[in-house]
Amino acid sequence: DIQMTQSPSSLSASVGDSVTITCRANQIIRSHLNWYQQKPGKAPDLLIFGASNLHTGVPPRFRGSGSGANFTLTIRNLQPADFATYYCQQTSTFPRTFGQGTKLDMK
Amino acid sequence: QVQLVQSGPEVQNPGASVRVSCKTSGYTVLPYKITWLRQAPGQGLEWMGWISGDNSQTEYTQKLQGRVSMTTDTSTRTVYMELTSLRFEDSAVYFCATETLVRGAPYYYYALDVWGQGTAVTVSS
């Protein structure tokens, strides 16, 4: 199975800040990397697919980049609704695997 | 709009089985891949497997092989996930989601774009 490692596991920031979350695969997954946002008690929402493609309705403050085995999610100008947990997921092979999550909370 | 609506919370004893349903609506044809995932309290997301909308293909995670099965009732457009021989560590919120081939740049990519609301399963004696 492909292992996905996210860092940091938690992050504190303020409204208006920019933050970056990284995700590393232990094998090459080309650009088959998605990012999801999850709020407490809710199902995750797709943010970015194919490493850098914004899902419909996702504001351009979210930016995904990377290919191969190293990826980043950057959120600029943090808004109150952005404080949540973020997961990366590889879809290069089965079983699909996720990073352990990064909890972003308000400083 | 497309929706996945899951069945309600379950409480089961260790060793029992649980079946969770996921009813699709708003699709003209059943989604090709419906995925099941789970999330233990305070933990991350775990991929369990997927089933095709026409009930012809399944793939399960090795970890749950022999205990999990997924089926589709095409007449009611409902997908089911059954987990047997329940253990305390199976307590989690179970999600269904459609894995869709989404057009990106420069290729198409698979992503979980529509999710059910989640079903809490508690294993307790």
Image: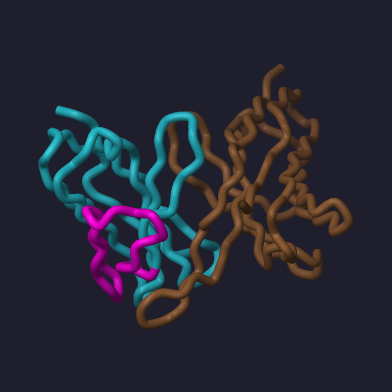
Q: Residue B96 or A63: which is nearer the viewer?
A: A63
> Residue furthest toward the bottom?
B106
* Chain given the colour cyan: A
* Image location (x, y in percent) of residue B64: 66, 51
Taking the magenta stretch, the answer to whether it contains residue B93 is no
Say if residue A22 shows up in the picture.
Answer: no
Residue occupying the point 69% across, 39% down: B6
Report whether B93 appears left or right of A37: right
- Where B1 sits versus A106, above or below? below
Taking the magenta stretch, the answer to whether it contains residue A57 is yes
Residue occupying the point 52% across, 34% down: B40
Q: Residue B92 or B3: which is nearer the viewer?
A: B3
Tell me the colour chain B is drawn in.
brown
* Image location (x, y in percent) of residue A66: 24, 70
Region rendered in magenta: A50-72
Q: Residue A73 or A78: which is nearer the viewer?
A: A78
Say if residue A83 shows up in the picture.
Answer: yes
Dividing the picture into quadrants, the one containing residue A73 is: bottom left
* Image location (x, y in percent) of residue A34: 39, 61
